[in-house]
Image (cartoon, rainbow, N blue to C red):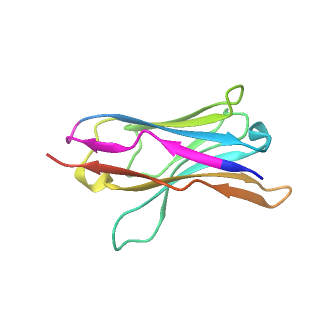
Amino acid sequence: QGQLVESGGGLVQPGGSLRLSCAASGFTFSNYAMTWYRQAPGKERELVAAVTSSGRSTNYADSVKGRFTISRDNAKATGYLQMNSLKPNDTAVYYCEARNIYYNIDYWGQGTQVTVSS
């Protein structure tokens, strides 16, 4: 059974940085596109950034462009979200998702809390 485990969340001051990791197991990670989502209290889940299975193409929400970078290491079956210049409204639970459109299979992590506060 496939599994995703996020790590790297925590409390950071405005302007600070964090790097989230998403470790995959139980499936062939390199065959899956990966997406990071976030959900703040009282708000709907929103897409933050996405990367294709090869890592060659990425996409970002306008709110994080220029500050966040999504990447992946298929050899390590791990995806990353580098977050710089963090703002209080980046506070949310961050989730990673791996999706194979061809087989219509997706996996979700349990989420990791990111809090940006002074």
Locate residue 25: give its quadrant: top right
Which residue lies at the image location 42% right of the left edge and 51% below the top edge? 62
Image coordinates for residue 83, horizontal then vertical, percent: 38, 38
Position of residue 61 in the picture relative to residue 12 (left or right): right
Q: Is residue 16 shown left or right of residue 50?
A: left
Give me the residue at 39% from left, 43% from top: 9
* Left or right position of 2 against 65: right
The residue positioned 58% from the left and 53% from the top of the image is: 109
Residue most extreme to the left: 118
In percent of width and height, residue 98 lies at 67, 50
Q: Name the one closer to the observer, 67 or 90.
A: 90
Q: Kindly identify the residue that appears in the image at 20 percent across and 40 percent down.
A: 13
In depth, the one of 62 and 54 nearer the eye is: 54
Which quarter of the figure is the C terminus placed in? top left
Q: Give residue 5's position: percent from left, percent from top.
A: 57, 46
Residue at the far front in the pictured view:
1
Q: Position of residue 22 (x, y in %)?
A: 57, 41
Write down the region rendered in magenta: 4-15
Count of numbered circles on the image: 0
Magenta run includes residue 9: yes
Most extreme residue toward the right is 103
- Residue furthest to the bottom: 42
Asked if residue 76 lies left or right of residue 103, the reply is left
Question: Quadrant of residue 11 in the image?
Answer: top left
Q: Look at the image and say whether residue 13 sits in the magenta stretch.
A: yes
